[in-house]
């Protein structure tokens, strides 16, 4: 007898759509009821109550899909549908996703599990799902037209295979991908090892998220699907800073972070304050002899990377993509460089014609952090976020790993800002500033000349045309 408790259990605030009645034989033969999520918050890990045990992951600003066991098969139900996703407080995007959110819920199974996924299509066009990285029968691989018929609107398809190898995977459509992935259709998949694995260590915290990107004009809500490279919202799990939750851990926790890239470009992901090992890729756990410590790992398009480190330094450590344009929100693009251009008088004249005109970036772009210019509705400032010392001037792919001595095991709540020990914060020098000696004594050269050079003269002639090239 399968009870409702076996169907859907969650440690978080997941809305279970199941009825309270015990499930009859008739219902067992039917589809598992889809579970929907309406919030963009990071949900507590979903502890497995049925099937083989494992240590669950935490999906950043996401959640794990509950399942039911049906005669030894783990059954999930994904619903492809239009969703409204808050990218950060102040901006909601009209995306496509699964079960109420983009990305869809994380699917967690154990190596050797037989998995059955029902996929219902509530989109206005056909779709399919490809199980990125999995070993499976060819007809379950999800490429519409090649491996299966596409799933028409209103129809439900069934995928079934054994999760053969442990690791970090993704799922996404393989039908009109350009549209459907640009609209946010994707999800994470983790297959846990069934026994102690020589290359997979037990960790205290196991986070996962997808890198994704959208091109949404300021004031609009729907992504432009034809965009190839010039995206303006660089997301982790369809969230941008300051909408991305922090990764909160206890000092000396072993931490694993799994990252998958479904954008159109690579992202060098950088962690402050600690060194990590890349312990896994799309192909599974990396052999130990291939691992080395680093603080940035590039995640190329379509790739997955699994990083691990010992969180043994207390503090609030920045964790972000190292492409600086990817830590900016929409307004940071297509703005001419104005550094060094003093155009106060010009600006005054333009203001007479265009009342809300603001010159961007004449002293650098930091002025934009304060953003005095009024923004269109449903638009995020290009860089924002208030830290304990002022504006953080970030957007996009940026978050913080918070390491605390007194964070409890299993507690993922935000401990607030780090209280720095006395004397451990960079401070302003208030003494005298000596002149740099070599400027005066050595002619401004780091490798000084032996004899003084004769004065040189440069003749500049303004080019008059290009006909001589
Ligand atoms: Cu990036």
Image: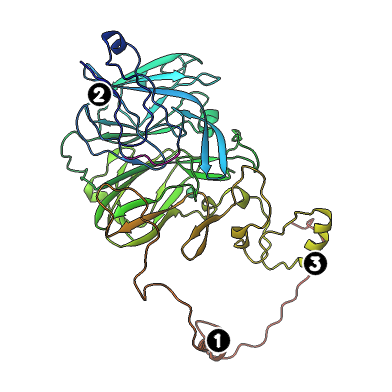
Which region of the structure is painted magenta?
A: 40-44
Which residue is denoted by mark 1 in the rendering? Answer: 439
Color theme of the render: rainbow
Which residue is denoted by mark 3 in the rendering? Answer: 345
Q: At 31% across and 62% down in the image, what residue appears? A: 314
20 or 12, nearer to the observer? 20
Q: Residue furthest front?
A: 20
Asked if the residue at label 1 sits under 8 Å from ligand 1, the reply is no
Whole-percent x, y for residue 289 in the image:
22, 50
Kindly report the secondary structure that dominates the magenta region of the rendered protein.
loop
Circle 1 SS class: helix
Whole-percent x, y for residue 237 in the image:
45, 40
Examine the structure image and report whether residue 395 is included in the region drawn in magenta: no
Which residue is denoted by mark 2 in the rendering? Answer: 6
- Above or below, 96 against 408 in this view is above
Q: Which of marks 3 and 1 is nearer the N terminus?
A: 3
Left or right relative to 466: residue 227: left
2 or 144, nearer to the observer? 2
Whole-percent x, y for residue 44 in the image:
33, 40
């Amino acid at each position: 007898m399968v009870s409702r408790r076996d169907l859907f259990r969650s440690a978080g605030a997941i809305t279970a759509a199941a009825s309270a009645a015990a499930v009859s034989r008739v219902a067992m033969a039917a589809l598992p009821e889809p579970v929907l999520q309406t919030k963009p918050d990071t949900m507590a890990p979903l502890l497995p109550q049925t099937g083989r045990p494992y240590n669950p992951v935490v999906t950043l600003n996401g959640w794990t899909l509950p399942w039911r066991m049906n005669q030894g098969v783990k059954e999930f139900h994904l619903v492809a549908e239009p969703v409204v996703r808050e990218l950060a407080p102040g901006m909601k995007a009209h995306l496509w996703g699964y079960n109420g959110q983009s990305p869809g819920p994380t699917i967690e199974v154990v190596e050797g599990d037989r998995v059955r996924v029902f996929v219902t299509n509530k989109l206005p066009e056909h779709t399919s799902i490809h199980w990125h990285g999995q070993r499976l029968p060819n007809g379950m691989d999800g490429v519409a037209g090649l491996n299966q018929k596409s799933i028409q609107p209103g129809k439900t398809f069934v995928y079934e295979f054994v999760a053969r190898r442990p690791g970090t995977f993704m799922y996404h459509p393989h039908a009109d991908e350009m549209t459907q992935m640009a609209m946010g259709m994707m999800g994470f998949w983790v297959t846990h090892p069934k026994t102690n694995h020589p290359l997979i260590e037990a960790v205290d915290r196991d986070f996962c998220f997808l890198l994704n990107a959208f091109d949404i004009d300021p004031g609009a809500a729907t992504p432009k699907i034809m965009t190839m490279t010039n995206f303006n919202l660089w997301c982790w799990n369809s969230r941008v800073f300051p909408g991305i939750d922090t990764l909160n851990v206890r000092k000396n926790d072993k931490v694993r972070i799994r990252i998958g890239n479904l954008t159109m470009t690579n992202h060098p992901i950088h962690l402050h304050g600690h060194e990590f090992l890349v312990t896994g890729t799309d192909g599974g756990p990396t052999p130990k002899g291939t691992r080395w410590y680093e603080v940035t790992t590039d995640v190329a398009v379509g790739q997955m990377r699994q990083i691990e480190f010992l969180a043994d330094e207390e503090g609030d450590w920045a964790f972000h993509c190292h492409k600086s344009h990817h830590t900016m929100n929409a307004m940071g693009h297509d703005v001419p460089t104005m550094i060094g251009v003093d155009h106060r008088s010009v600006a005054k004249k333009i203001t007479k014609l265009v009342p809300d005109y603001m010159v961007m970036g004449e002293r650098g772009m930091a002025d934009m952090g304060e953003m005095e210019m009024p923004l269109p509705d449903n638009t995020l400032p290009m860089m924002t976020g208030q830290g304990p010392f002022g504006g953080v001037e970030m957007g996009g792919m940026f978050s913080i790993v918070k390491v605390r001595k007194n964070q409890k095991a299993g507690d993922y709540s935000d401990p607030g800002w780090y209280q720095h020990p006395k004397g451990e914060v960079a401070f302003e020098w208030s003494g005298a500033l000596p002149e740099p000696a070599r400027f005066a004594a050595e002619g401004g050269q780091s490798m000084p000349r032996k004899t003084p050079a004769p004065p040189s003269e440069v003749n500049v002639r303004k080019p008059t045309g290009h006909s001589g090239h």
